[in-house]
Image: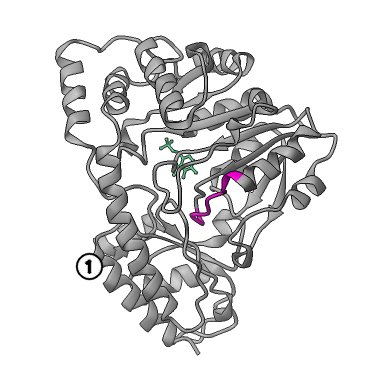
Amino acid sequence: MTKLGRELAAKGVNVISLSVGEPDFNTPEHVKDAAKKALDENWTRYSPVPGYPELRQAIVNKLKTENNLDYDISQIVVSTGAKQSLSNVILTLINPGDEVIIPTPYWVSYSEMVVLAEGKSVFINTEIDNNFKITPAQLEAAITPKTKLFMFSSPNNPTGTVYSKDELAALAKVFEKHPQVFILSDEIYEHINFVDKHESIAQFDSIKDRVIIINGFSKAFAMTGWRLGYIAANKTIAAANDKLQGQTTSGTCSISQRAGIVAYEQGLASVNKMKEAFARRRQLVYDLLSDIPGVRTNLPEGAFYFFPEISSFFGKKDQDGNIIKNSSDLALYLLNVGHVATVGGDSFGNDNYIRLSYAASDESLIEALKRIKAALGKLA
Ligand code: PMP
């Protein structure tokens, strides 16, 4: 959709993009300065495969001070974005035929990475009525002797759902009964949480050794292009990821890593400023979306997305008589008629919804929601 939106924009159409998954802020100045300094100091050679020890130490310190989690640097592997971290974990852990439980909706690449590893995705469906959260009973029912991994994100992309400590504790109780299951906890949106402090499922000692935390700098520090992510995991998994990465990409960009050290050492002031803007826009979009007949939304607790239900428009016709059959049709209609780019929920494993990113200015959001309302109002 981002690509189609760009094509339309190249033809001179004023398209508002709510389809991208990245903050609309610049990388903080102190992080950019650290990168410039790294260049001047010639941090330009190959780095150790799992990352510079100083960066891994900064990650260990962050996990202790922010999350009260104890790790050793031998348990940290830094990669070319959280995306490579995810891919490393799945490729090293999943053998052909292994089952991977993924709650829907989920971030697009999860299931495709499982395909690459020749595993089998097993989906647990969630809906807006339960704030897109799975229950312990649903989890228990999905686990089989072939289950190798459970993977989820909290805060979630595309729904913004945040699991509370009690909810995670209840899921941990289920995992206690199934010692063959690893838990991949994607915490890349950790700092964009509007309800409470971030809770990691790694805090439960009974399962910690089987939890693989995924995190990175893309969202918290508006560093999507810098490609910097990491895992915190048990030593065997960390060593396997190191080994795989040593034969694929090697250590990630040296300049990005040096900047990452400074980002973590200097704390969260810039993140909190960004979060304030997201909090304001979340309320804005919530109010505007709630005012559109036929659209059902919740108030997401984190990340910077809404995932409203839009299935009431299925079966309706556009002005040329084309029938809207699914979420992709609706997203395409909103692009062509409303000139707003969104993403159909089918990309995230749930076709009754669309994803809107509110990583855009307040004025763009107000105009975009006005256009969406007008376009949807024309469907008959
Ligand atoms: N996990 C989730 C849930 C994401 O939304 C994204 C990025 N859209 C990533 C991982 C990958 O992040 P990175 O830029 O660090 O590769």
Closer to the camera in the image, 325 or 322: 325
Instruction: Tell me, yes or no, if residue 17 can be seen here.
Output: no
Residue 84 image point, x, y percent: 49, 29
**What residue is shown at x 33% (from left), y 77% (from top)?**
371
Residue bearing mark 1: 363
The amino acid marked with disc number 1 is Glu
Q: Position of residue 336 (x, y in %)?
A: 38, 72
Quadrant assignment for ligand 1: top left
Q: Residue at x 32, y 27 (%)?
A: 264
Q: Say if 100 sits above or below 105 in the image.
A: above
Q: Main secondary structure of the magenta part?
A: loop
Magenta segment: does it hold 12? no
Element marked by disc 1: helix
The image shows residue 358 at horizontal and vertical percentages of 35, 59
Quadrant of the rendered image containing residue 277: bottom left
Mark 1 nearby-residue class (10 Å; few <14, some 14–19, many ≥20): few
Range of residues picked out in magenta:
158-165
Q: Where residue 164 appears, x then y in whole percent?
A: 56, 48
Q: Judge whether residue 159 is colored magenta.
A: yes
Residue 280 appears in view: yes
User: Is 298 placed left or right of 351 in the picture?
Assistant: left
| Quarter in which the N terminus is drawn | bottom left
